[in-house]
Amino acid sequence: MAASTTTMTEKARKYYEEIEAFYVSLYGPNFHHGYWPSPDDGTTYERALDNLTDQIISRVGVGAGDRVLDVGCGMGGPAIRLARATGARVTGISNVASQIRQATALAAAEGMAELVTFELADALALPLPDASFDAAIAVESLIHMPRDPVLGEIARILRPGGRLVAADFCLNSPVSEVRRELLDLYQRLDTLSPIIGFDEFGPMIRRAGLQPIELLDATKHIENSPRMWRDRMHADRQNLTDRYGQEGLSGFDKLIDDVITHGGPDYLFFTARKPSPARRP
Ligand code: SAH
């Protein structure tokens, strides 16, 4: 593996070890945005977090007996929900040991350990055979990796005809100077790969040897999320102050307020398929 990709994996690991308590407070076992069918429809945050996973599940098209890889599985919420909804066998991988421990415990507590397992692994060097999965999902994880190499790895482990469904960050609207600065900060603090244009996803998917099936800008469905983070931060203030200190917390406050005011990254779902070999005439 190239030195730069090793460094990215290490940086992401350190970031997630440090941020874990904050994320648990904001997201529970679902380290991703919420999804609202329409922005002011009264959907609770809890429900919106599950809705986002359901958007992935509805696109992945798997059932009992299928094998699904969850790339960058976090605390396991999405993998467990996917297995419960479809009956598929799900393997979640992450580069953070404490996530794997907690995700494994959650699957056991929810009676899902037969169908869902979690392993410590680097998504850029998956310890998995070629063509061994019917589908893969990647929920807000690709942004932490150089995307071409990770998409290549996912294409390798998918069987021909297998699907990848991902939720990812992008840019698909005009960027004011203040939003540009905010996105740069967001990227430095939170993510490691560049936030690329919506239109760059199709060519990137093709470069990995996959066929794009759907690219959908979902920004307006996730935009309530930062207000929910702010509410949760207030509710868990003491605990978070003990963990990150006043100063650390005011940094998070400012970032969240700025995202609410100026807008964060745009957001998309994409579905891609590994082509089946052409039939001989
Ligand atoms: N998909 C999960 C977690 C999203 S957070 C959810 O929706 O809840 C991003 C995840 O990507 C974290 O679990 C992080 O540890 C993981 N990740 C980042 N870089 C990785 C890498 N190189 N290999 C494996 N996992 C990685």
Image (tube, rainbow, N blue to C red):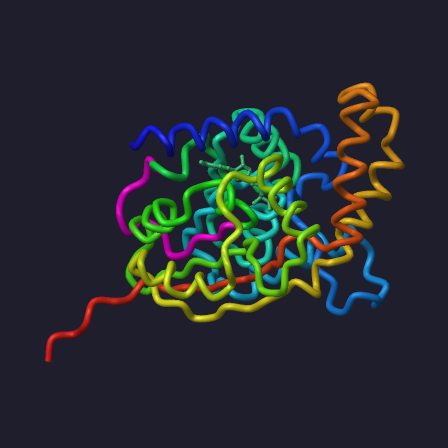
Give the residue at x 66% y 35%. 109
Where is the N terminus found, in terms of image quarters?
A: top left
Give the residue at x 66% y 44%. 30
Q: Quadrant of residue 279?
A: bottom left
Between 139 and 194, the one nearer to me in the picture: 194
Give the residue at x 28% y 51%. 131
Where is the C terminus found, in terms of image quarters?
A: bottom left
Q: Is residue 7 left or right of residue 159?
A: right
Q: Is residue 123 left or right of residue 96?
A: left
Q: Is residue 184 above or below residue 208?
A: above
Q: Is residue 106 above or below residue 17?
A: below
- Highlighted range, magenta: 126-138
Any magenta on residue 245?
no
Between 137 and 266, the one nearer to me in the picture: 266
Give the residue at x 26% y 47%. 130
- Residue at the farthest front position: 177
